[in-house]
Image (tube, rainbow, N blue to C red):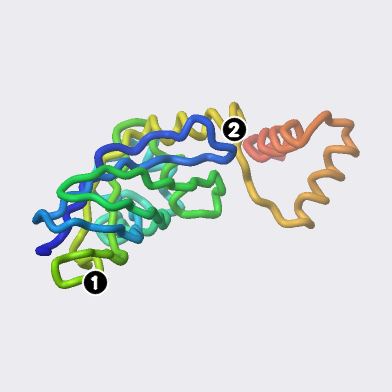
Amino acid sequence: MNGLTFTVLDVLAEPYSVTPRLTARIGIVASDDEPIQAIALRCQIRIEPLRRPYSDEEADGLLDLFGPRERWVNTQRTFLWQHGTAMVQGFTGVTEISMPLECTYDFEVAASKYLHALRDGAVPLLFLFSGTVFVQGERGFSVRQVSWECEAQHEMPVSVWRDLMRSHYPNTGWVRLGHDTVAALAAYKSARGMLDFEDAVTTLLTQASRPEEVR
């Protein structure tokens, strides 16, 4: 057995999942005809931000992550998005599998900040594969490791991510706040007879955006 080759064929939204989930379709090619009994496959999925251009609007959204555009040559580094796993059934030669990718809209997560800032184009992904290969050959059963050199790039359309989040959180988003902040916001809302937290936040933002009056 000379090795395995992995190709990311597509990344699509899982339409019937309870929580946001993508599915990566991965093609696997064994370099010879030796039957593979199974693969316990692991994958680290990373984002490579230097592989795409950004509009001024997107650059504003990425300020927290990378700083101003003139610093990007030093600050835009490949970073982790998530890990995926899949159990590959036995095959000979070529097979395709589905790997579930759980997603979050938590803005405390760097990848979520990055993805939310993008408006169009593609998300530059890098899949780094590892795992255990179970082989039944002429000399008996053996266990081998997926080569650390096994990797694949993929351009996932930004629309895939945006449509996924829109379907699970229509016209809404999530911001994590501390208990004291939530309590203070609730008191502010109640004292002014506001209907919901969005009214309270909108009012505070409007007040903060007004220029100070010149006395």
Up/down of 169 relative to 92, above or below: above
The residue lying at 83 percent from left, 44 percent from top is: 186
Q: Is residue 144 visible?
A: no
The residue lying at 26 percent from left, 40 percent from top is: 155
- Callout 2 secondary element: loop
Q: Is residue 207 left or right of residue 40?
A: right
The quarter in which the N terminus is drawn is bottom left
The residue lying at 38 percent from left, 53 percent from top is: 86
Q: Position of residue 63 (x, y in %)?
A: 42, 49
The disc at residue 169 is 2
Quadrant of the image occupied by residue 75: bottom left
Q: Is residue 175 left or right of residue 98?
A: right
Q: Is residue 139 left or right of residue 95?
A: left
Identify the mark nearer the N-term, 1 or 2.
1
For mark 2, does the 10 Å Cα neighbourhood hold few (<14), some (14 to 19), or many (20 or more) residues?
few
Up/down of 91 relative to 158, above or below: below
For mark 1, does the 10 Å Cα neighbourhood hold few (<14), some (14 to 19), or many (20 or more) residues?
few
- Callout 1 secondary element: strand
Quadrant of the image occupied by residue 38: bottom left
Callout 1 amino acid: Ser
Q: Position of residue 99 (x, y in %)?
A: 38, 47
Q: Is residue 92 visible?
A: yes
Query: Distance from label 1 to label 2 (Cα)?
Result: 47 Å
Up/down of 207 relative to 63, above or below: above
The disc at residue 142 is 1
Quadrant of the image occupied by residue 167: top right
> Which numbered mark, 1 or 2, is in the foreground of this view?
1
